[in-house]
Amino acid sequence: MTVLIVHTAVKYLFMSLQKIDFTCILKNRSIIAISGNDKEPFLQGIVTQDVKILQNQPIIYSLMLSPQGKFQFDFFIINLKDLWLIDIESPRAQSFLQKLQLFKLRSDVDIRMIDWQVGVSLTKQVYENCFLDPRLEELGYRYYSQKIDFSHQSAYESHCLALGVPRGATDMIVDKSIPLEWGMDELKAISWNKGCYMGQELTARSRYVGQIRKRSFPISFENPGEHTVGDKILSGETEVGELRATKGSLGIALLKLESIGKELHINNNFIKVHQPHWMVLPG
């Protein structure tokens, strides 16, 4: 069974998920509020995306990197006029808050956790703070409120996996993952035109020198439940990648680009590798 990059399989998976309105609360998200006159210049010097975009659109997706240009945090920034929200993974929220406090120095900003909820839906909801996901239109809407009525389980995680969209530190490895290997450029987390930020030099070098030799891809396999995150992916006897996420028959794998087009297997089971429509690969 030859492994090919299959566009139609991802399209089929996406079309099947489209039929489900995945309206739900994301219970693993927390909200940090930032206010004060210096909130824009304060964040501009820290994050990878250009926060000036918030003057024209209400929500952006961004990262904070290590000085070595490795992934540390991913999050959304939402402009509610005098109050900006940061939508971030709950297990990482307190650590991110402490980082922000370290950078605060004499900036006129107030940073605090607030008890708001985060919801997602394929269709727009009747909430004042409801915005289209800035990464991909297919990811639907994110909405923010002190109380959200929906609480049932959903197909949202499978939807993200089918589209090859990583779930922050759940799939990427803190202080190790390289943002461009995970499509953070195409998913609009990085600005190439703004000024400096931590890790900017190495991230820019990776892009312009063409040093990216691995990419994360959505994959599918025939034996769901037999594979766990960290399992090695092989081409023959050669290790070419690692499973980084799995749910049912779907997963995300970090693969060497030179392995694409070859027969790949995990735990002696062949896999299919899919290229999402948003992913740009080297020519």
Image (cartoon, helix red, strand yellow):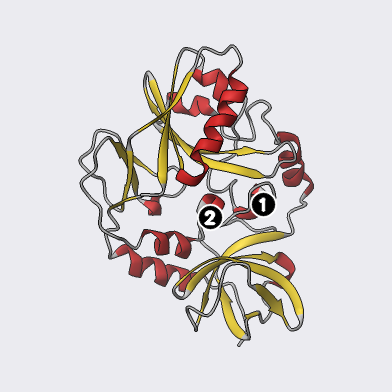
Q: Quadrant of the C terminus?
A: bottom right
Q: Position of residue 123 (x, y in %)?
A: 27, 50
Q: Tell me the residue that label 1 is attached to.
A: 177
Query: Gap in Å between the C-alphas at discs 1 and 2?
Result: 12 Å
* Disc 2 packing (10 Å; few <14; some 14–19; many ≥20): few
- Please tell me whether mark 2 sits on a helix, a strand or a loop: helix
| Pick the front one: 269 or 184 | 269
- Tell how many labels: 2
Could you tell me which secondary element the residue under label 1 belongs to?
Answer: loop
Residue 70 image position (x, y, % from top left): 69, 45
Q: Name above or below for residue 235 compared with residue 67.
A: below
Q: Position of residue 69 (x, y in %)?
A: 71, 41
| Numbered label attached to residue 170 | 2
Q: What is the three-letter code of the residue carrying label 2?
A: Thr
Q: For the residues carrying marks 1 and 2, which lies nearer the camera in this image?
A: 2
Q: Is residue 213 left or right of residue 168?
A: right
